[in-house]
Amino acid sequence: QVQLVESGGNLVQPGGSLRLSCVVSSAIFRSWNMAWYRQAPGEQRELVAAISRRGTTNYTDSVKGRFTISRDNAKNTLYLQMNSLKPRDAAVYYCNRGGWGASEFPNWGQGTQVTVSS
């Protein structure tokens, strides 16, 4: 089964930046639409950003202009550059398939914690 390993989360002040990474254990990573999701305490997991296998991107309104999703197919790695972070961005961030109707893998990774606080 595919393994998803997220990293890069940390405590950052409002206005700061972080870069998240997700390594996917599959040689056919390049053929999937991928996405970043986040889940804050007491809330449902939401899709934050998606990137198609061809590189088309899509973002939820609350992060447009601040977050950038990208992928390196040679490294089977998905990235999320997060700038101008706000307290409401605090959550556990996960990667998985997603976007344009792509179905998620049933086994999620452990996620990476992003905390935004002064």
Image (spheres, rainbow, N blue to C red):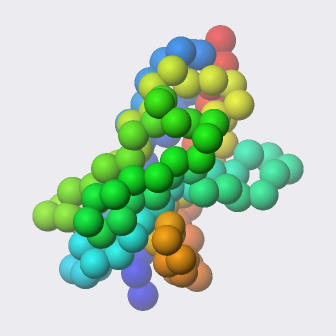
Measuring 34% from the left and 57% from the top, which residue is drawn there? 56
Residue found farthest to the top? 118
Q: Residue at x 59, y 16 (%)?
A: 14
Taking the view exactly as shown, the residue that stands out farthest to the left is 74
Q: Give the image quarter of residue 106.
A: bottom right
Query: Which quadrant does the C terminus fall into?
Result: top right
- Tell me: 76 left or right of 100: left
In front: 44, or 112? 44
Say which residue appears at 61% left-offset and 41% top-offset: 61
Height in image: 20 above or below 14? below
> Between residues 113 and 60, which one lies in front from this camera angle?
60
Residue 83 lies, with reference to residue 92, above or below; the image says above
Residue 45 percent across, percent down from the top left: 70, 58
Q: Is residue 12 above or below residue 46?
A: above
Q: Is residue 21 visible?
A: no
Q: Splitting the image into 4 quarters, where does residue 77 fall?
A: bottom left
> Residue 21, position in %: x, y?
36, 49
